[in-house]
């Protein structure tokens, strides 16, 4: 196990010297060429497929993330069973996905106000069970759910909501996140991981469920405390538990910059390397980094378009995430049909990122990193705020203004008045005053739940101080 951070310049050298499976550094680079286990499968069109070496499952490289489901039109009464979510549209999109080779569907008991599993189950139940793989999670975030019986109940309820007798891919959810125990004490990601899954006997019970056929693949998703990642892989190395797959955040910005963007996070190249040398398939989340890599500023967009005028901005990120051969599937939360259709095109089939394109994307990543946006992916894990602040909306407005050049720094700039007005008027329009950053008291309740390890009170304070500075300096809008 690694005990220190590895620089991006030394990573290939480290990997070559530490595992016989990847002897020269060139072998690791070759592994990122995206060799497909199977380019097509009967009835699955041209979708690029990957084979899980642990089970032989042939899985679509594009996975459907059921975290941001389509909602009913504004003003439409909520459905008694699925609330504000548009089940008819969900069914249509699931049908389209299956027809075009997508067979991996990822959900959780906490997604979509607790209704994602139900909506997913309704949509998938209309199709033969052997035509798709269901991934869901043990999302036992609150200390009251850390008891074995409560976590067991969560698993049983997932089976009920998904209308199935077994889960194809079950994950321990967000294992690096911190938490608060029943006494209100803050726990590190490592200690919370042990309390949620190991010390309470839950993992031993899950292994029994796997042996009984109720779970086919057992893995975990990781954000946050790298010690939790190391600890879980150590359990794998020691033979105490076997991980059939692991879900990590991987995109071309996080490849080398995750640790520099968020203190305590770890670069994707390191996470992927640790899984790859063990032969553990990687499931990829946040290929677009919460949409950030699909909504770059005009200058970066122009560079990408100049390189390939026919490619969409998002397709660059999806191709990057799908290229390494150890990647089993890349998840995308596709709220709209057009997003689903575009992503299906990108992976039907995948055209792997070349060495030259890799270097080009590292240049783009350096430019994006230099913008110093808040690395929020709008996952909503920080919500609800007990003081009513819309945390993701505050970050979204600030980041959007950075990308659009509307964060003026000097009142002497000829564009200052225009930029100032765009920031302040846009702030009030996108975030109601009572939900803006000024109402943060710094309680820190949100921080322990943030997968990106953002110091949320600090960032909210920075946004509030900047907004107040603009209000004081410029006079009337």
Image: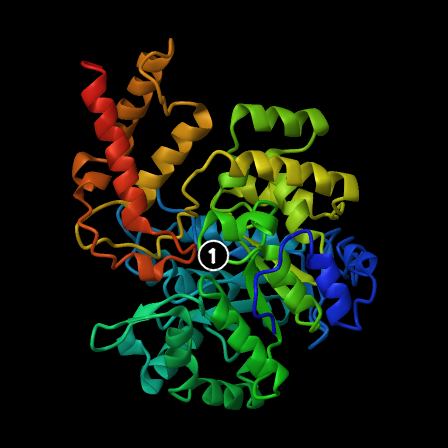
Q: Residue at x 21, y 29 (%)?
A: 468
Query: Could you tell me residue 186's position as x and y percent?
Result: 28, 69
How crowded is the residue under tag 1: few (<14 C-alpha within 10 Å), some, or many (20+)? many
Q: Left or right: where does residue 147 sit relative to residue 246? A: left
Q: Which residue is labeled 1 in the image?
A: 66
Q: Is residue 109 above or below residue 151?
A: above
Q: How is the image coloured?
A: rainbow
Determine which quarter of the picture holds residue 3: bottom right
Q: Residue at x 28, y 51 (%)?
A: 78
In this view, the residue in front, 407 or 130, is 407
Q: Residue at x 35, y 86 (%)?
A: 148
Q: Where is the C terminus found, in terms of image quarters?
A: top left
Q: Residue at x 50, y 49 (%)?
A: 260
Query: Could you tell me residue 373's position as x and y percent?
Result: 43, 38
In this view, the residue in front, 181 or 42, is 181
Q: Left or right: where does residue 162 sit relative to residue 210? A: left
Query: Can residue 219 be seen in this snapshot?
Result: no
Q: Left or right: where does residue 131 sit relative to residue 71? A: right
Q: Left or right: where does residue 382 sit relative to residue 388? A: right
Q: Is residue 78 above or below residue 184?
A: above
Q: Where is the N terminus found, in terms of image quarters?
A: bottom right
Of helix, strand and loop, which one carries label 1?
Answer: loop
In this view, the residue in front, 74 or 214, is 214
Query: Could you tell me residue 381's position as x and y percent?
Result: 35, 57
């Amino acid at each position: 196990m690694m005990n220190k951070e590895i620089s991006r310049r030394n990573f290939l050298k480290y990997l070559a010297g530490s595992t016989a499976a990847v002897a020269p550094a060139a072998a690791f680079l070759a592994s990122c060429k995206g060799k497909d286990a199977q380019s097509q499968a009967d009835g699955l069109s041209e979708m690029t497929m990957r084979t899980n070496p642990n089970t032989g499952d042939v899985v679509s490289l594009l996975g459907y993330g059921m975290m941001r489901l389509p909602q009913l039109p504004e003003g439409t009464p909520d459905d008694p069973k699925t609330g504000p979510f548009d089940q008819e549209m969900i069914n249509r999109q699931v049908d389209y996905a299956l027809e075009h080779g997508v067979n991996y569907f990822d959900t959780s008991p906490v997604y979509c106000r607790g209704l994602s599993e139900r909506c997913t189950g309704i949509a998938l139940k209309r199709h033969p069970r052997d035509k798709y793989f269901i991934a869901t999670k043990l999302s036992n975030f609150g200390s009251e759910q850390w008891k074995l019986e409560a976590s067991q109940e969560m698993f049983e309820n997932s089976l009920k909501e998904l209308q199935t007798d077994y889960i194809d891919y079950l994950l321990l959810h967000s294992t690096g996140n911190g938490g608060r125990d029943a006494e209100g004490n803050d726990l590190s990601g490592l200690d919370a991981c042990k309390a949620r899954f190991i010390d309470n006997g839950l993992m031993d019970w899950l292994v029994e469920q796997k042996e009984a056929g109720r779970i086919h693949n057992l893995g975990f998703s990781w954000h946050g405390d790298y010690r939790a990642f190391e600890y879980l892989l150590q359990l794998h190395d020691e033979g105490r538990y076997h991980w059939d797959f692991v879900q990590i955040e991987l995109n071309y910005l996080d490849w080398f910059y995750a640790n520099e963007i968020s203190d305590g996070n770890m670069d994707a190249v390191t996470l992927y390397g640790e899984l790859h040398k063990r032969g553990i398939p990687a499931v990829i989340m946040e290929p677009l980094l919460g949409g950030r890599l699909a909504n770059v500023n005009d200058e970066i967009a122009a560079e990408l378009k100049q390189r390939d005028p026919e490619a969409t901005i998002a397709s660059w990120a999806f191709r990057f995430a799908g290229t390494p051969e150890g990647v089993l599937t890349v998840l995308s939360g596709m709220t709209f049909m057009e997003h689903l259709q575009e992503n299906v095109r990108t992976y039907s089939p995948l055209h792997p990122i070349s060495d030259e394109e890799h270097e080009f994307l590292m240049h783009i990543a350096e430019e994006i990193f230099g913008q110093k946006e808040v690395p929020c992916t709008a996952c909503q894990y920080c919500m609800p705020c007990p003081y009513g602040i819309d945390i993701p909306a505050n970050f979204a407005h600030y980041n959007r203004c950075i990308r659009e050049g509307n964060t003026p720094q000097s009142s002497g700039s000829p564009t200052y008045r225009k930029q100032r007005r765009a920031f302040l008027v846009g702030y009030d329009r996108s975030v109601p005053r009572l939900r803006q950053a000024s109402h943060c008291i710094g309680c820190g309740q949100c921080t322990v739940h943030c997968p990106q390890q953002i110091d949320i009170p600090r960032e909210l304070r920075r946004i509030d101080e900047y907004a107040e500075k603009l209000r004081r300096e410029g006079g009337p809008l």
